[in-house]
Image: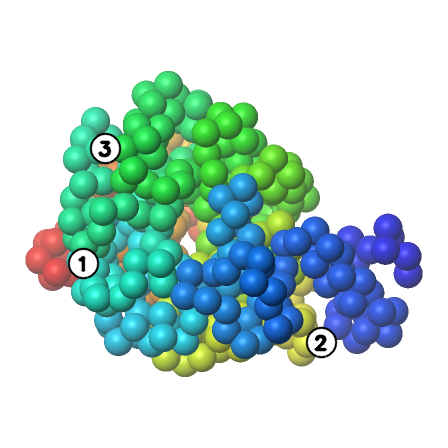
């Protein structure tokens, strides 16, 4: 197989055995290294850019677009974690990039990170946080910095955008540039879980953003367009960080059929345009598994099999694509993708606090579907939207203090 004939789909279609047989794996890795995007070998030269805290033996590193920052391909999504020892262990093991947000655990997530990084050299870790569009944006950023005990974050994302207009809104551009110029954010970006290709392209167009944090996983239904948008961003020097790589973590609400999350993470990172991924970690087992991935991205034939690539699109699972196709179909224009994301937080991640927070922020009536005799929504992924919506909306009735 000639290099020019090899693309990512070929890689997945062939599986590891086929690629090894054709020598394509080494060609793919050689190509990535040639682009300067990936480095693994020792010894290092003195001129080689160093990741925060220095290189670890065997780790695979990539460069985050024009920021020039070198990061391990695996980072830590801290959102669902509440154990500082786990975060400490991740840092001690060489994972340097911690991802949080102003709203996670109502601020306790940032506080916990602040506790863990206190006393560590500032150049030994890399912190990203997110703040939503808000008139008090700079004030909220200051609150985040205070909780983290930092003068600046490494990446500040404008949190959770799903439309081009919001990415390019003059007030948003102004406040993000202000945050960077003030020195409170080294780099700025946007995060997106829905309509990602549009958001990524708008971020490139805006020219001010250094990074995009995007949903990306093996279940993505519009993968071709998403891959193209990611490639365009990477070519323009915008660093790409992947989230939601675990695609909901389970195939079923009852959590009897786990997704092979190690395979799912490897799958995402086999796209060389993605610098690093931020899988959510809540257990030491997950950390251990992710530390294996940071050294080895090769998918075994068994792992490929587990991802059910051929049949996955016929399984509802817990992961909402954020494709928005359901929104115009709903007679009440309900925020279905957000409610389905809350459903995934509750049943996939067992993070009831995050689900409660999201559901409460949407402020829907107790029965949002009242008066609608037949649900007109046909989810592209066969979700029973009405049932899931009513199910997860029950969380709203639980007082906030139960999640504190
Ligand atoms: S609920 Fe279904 S149609 Fe709506 S955004 Fe999610 S995957 Fe797409
Ligand atoms: S049943 Fe609910 S989700 Fe379905 S169309 Fe009616 S309001 Fe929308």
Badge 1 element: helix
In the rendered image, which residue does mark 1 sit on?
111
Task: Find residue 291 and report its horizontal and vertical position in percent.
Answer: 49, 75
Calculate the distance from the C-alpha at mark 2 to the C-alpha at mark 3.
47 Å
In the rendered image, which residue does mark 2 sit on?
301
323 or 268, nearer to the observer: 268
Badge 3 element: helix
Answer with left or right where residue 88 lies relative to residue 71. Answer: left
Most extreme residue toward the front is 46
Q: Quadrant of residue 302?
A: bottom right
238 or 201, nearer to the observer: 238
In the rendered image, which residue does mark 3 sit on?
137
Badge 2 element: helix
333 or 351, nearer to the observer: 351
Calculate the distance from the C-alpha at mark 2 to the C-alpha at mark 1.
41 Å
Calculate the distance from the C-alpha at mark 1 to the C-alpha at mark 3.
19 Å
**One can see residue 228 in this view:** yes
Most extreme residue toward the top is 170
Q: Residue at x 39, y 21 (%)?
A: 169
* Vertical arrangement, residue 87 with respect to residue 225, above or below: below
């Amino acid at each position: 197989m000639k290099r020019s004939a090899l693309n990512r789909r070929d890689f997945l279609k062939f599986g590891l055995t086929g690629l090894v047989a054709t020598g394509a794996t080494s060609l793919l890795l050689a190509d990535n290294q040639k682009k300067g995007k990936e480095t693994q070998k020792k010894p290092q030269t003195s001129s080689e850019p160093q990741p925060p805290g220095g290189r670890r033996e065997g780790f695979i590193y990539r460069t985050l677009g024009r920021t020039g920052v070198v990061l391990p391909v695996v980072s830590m999504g801290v959102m669902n974690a509440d154990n500082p020892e786990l975060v400490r262990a991740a840092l001690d093991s060489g994972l340097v990039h911690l991802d949080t947000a102003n709203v996670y655990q109502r601020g306790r997530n940032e506080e916990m990170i602040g506790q863990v990084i206190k006393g560590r050299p500032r150049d030994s870790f890399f912190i990203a946080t997110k703040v939503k569009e808000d008139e008090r944006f700079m004030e909220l950023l200051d609150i985040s910095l205070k909780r983290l005990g930092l003068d600046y974050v490494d990446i500040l994302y404008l949190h959770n955008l799903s439309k081009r207009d919001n990415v390019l809104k003059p007030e948003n551009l102004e406040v993000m540039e202000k945050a960077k110029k003030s020195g409170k954010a080294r780099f700025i970006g946007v995060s997106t879980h829905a309509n990602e290709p549009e958001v990524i392209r708008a971020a490139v167009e805006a020219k001010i953003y250094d990074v995009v944090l995007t949903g990306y996983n093996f279940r993505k239904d519009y993968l071709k367009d998403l891959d193209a948008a990611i490639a365009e961003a990477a070519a323009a020097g915008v660093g790409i960080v992947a989230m939601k790589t675990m695609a909901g973590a389970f195939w079923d609400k009852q959590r009897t059929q786990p997704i092979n999350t190690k395979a799912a993470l490897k799958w995402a990172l086999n796209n060389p345009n993605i610098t690093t991924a931020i899988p959510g970690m809540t257990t030491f087992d997950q950390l251990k598994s992710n530390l294996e991935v940071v050294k080895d991205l090769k998918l075994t034939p068994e792992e490929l099999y587990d991802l059910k690539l051929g049949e996955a699109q016929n399984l509802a699972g817990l992961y909402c694509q954020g494709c928005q196709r359901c929104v115009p179909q709903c007679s009440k224009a309900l925020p279905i993708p957000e409610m389905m994301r809350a459903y995934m937080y509750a049943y996939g991640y067992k993070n009831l606090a995050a689900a409660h927070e999201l559901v409460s922020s949407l402020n829907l009536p107790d029965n949002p579907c009242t008066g609608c005799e037949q649900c007109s929504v046909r989810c592209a992924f066969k979700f029973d939207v009405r049932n899931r919506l009513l199910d997860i909306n029950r969380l709203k009735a639980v007082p906030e203090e139960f999640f504190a």
